[in-house]
Amino acid sequence: MPPHLLSRPLPDAIKTELERLFLDKVIANLGLCVSVYDIRSIEGGSIHPGEGCSTYKVSFRLLMFKPFNGEVLVGRIIGYDDKGLQVSLDFFSDISIPGHLMQFGTVRGPDGRWMLKTEDGDELYLDLDDEIRFLVSSTKYPPIPIDQKEDDPPFAPMQIVGSIKGDGLGLLAWWAADEEEGRRRQSKSNSIVLL
């Protein structure tokens, strides 16, 4: 632990150092560190010759974001291209929904946006900033690239692939009318009295 933190209470100083080391970082196969949950034990407190830092053995727990396959999440569309949609959860943005994992009938429109063509002939566009409910298909932890070209997208240590194939998945606006209709039917059936 750096010397400038030694004036603080020990648990607070250690938590600050743990947050500096782990917060907002991806640990392969564990996920994205969201918070230091707690510190279970602190042992030691030695200073090695020639160093100004103190060394402690600390047992702690981290709060990690690692969605499981099949989990349903709600995000916001932040981009699209010919491969599919890019989605953000505000704190995590390396989520893609490829075209082959979208609802049947979803195609790219003439302006490049993705749209769902319904059986009734309606065209429902998936626009930027729309809220979207998706199912986690897979979570990948790619190896760090040795050579990265200038025009390559930034390296993402954790990538989530989502799907909107299925009932209840897709834009929240698509299902809002169905949910409201279900609530109305439920309230009508609750108001019927049998004599």
Image (tube, rainbow, N blue to C red):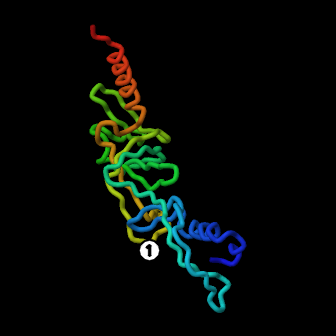
Q: Name the spot of residue 120 as percent of width and height, x first.
A: 29, 25
For residue 170, which quarter of the picture? top left
Picture mark count:
1
Report the side of 105 relative to 173 (left or right).
left
**Residue tagged 1:** 147
Residue 60 position, x and y percent, is 50, 68
Which residue is depicted at the point 43% across and 75% down?
146
Q: Please, what is the three-letter code of the amino acid marked with disc 1?
A: Asp
Residue at (40% x, 47% y) in the render:
85
| Local crowd size for mark 1, using a 10 Å CA cut-off: few (<14), some (14–19), many (≥20) | few
Identify the image quadrant of the C terminus: top left
Q: Residue furthest top?
A: 195
Secondary structure under the numbered disc 1 in the rendered image: loop
Q: Quadrant of residue 164?
A: top left
Q: Is residue 11 above or below residue 67?
A: below
Q: Quadrant of the N terminus?
A: bottom right
Vertical order, 131 against 55 (above or below): above
Give the camera-side residue of 161 and 190: 190
Front position in the image: 6 or 89: 6
Query: Which residue: 57% across, 66% down?
Result: 19
Q: Furthest residue to the bottom?
A: 49
Rendered position, 190 above or below 27: above
Location of residue 175 with respect to 160 vertically, above or below: above
Q: Is residue 104 left or right of residue 112?
A: left
Find residue 2 and report its horizontal and vertical position in percent: 65, 77
Residue 33 located left or right of residue 176: right
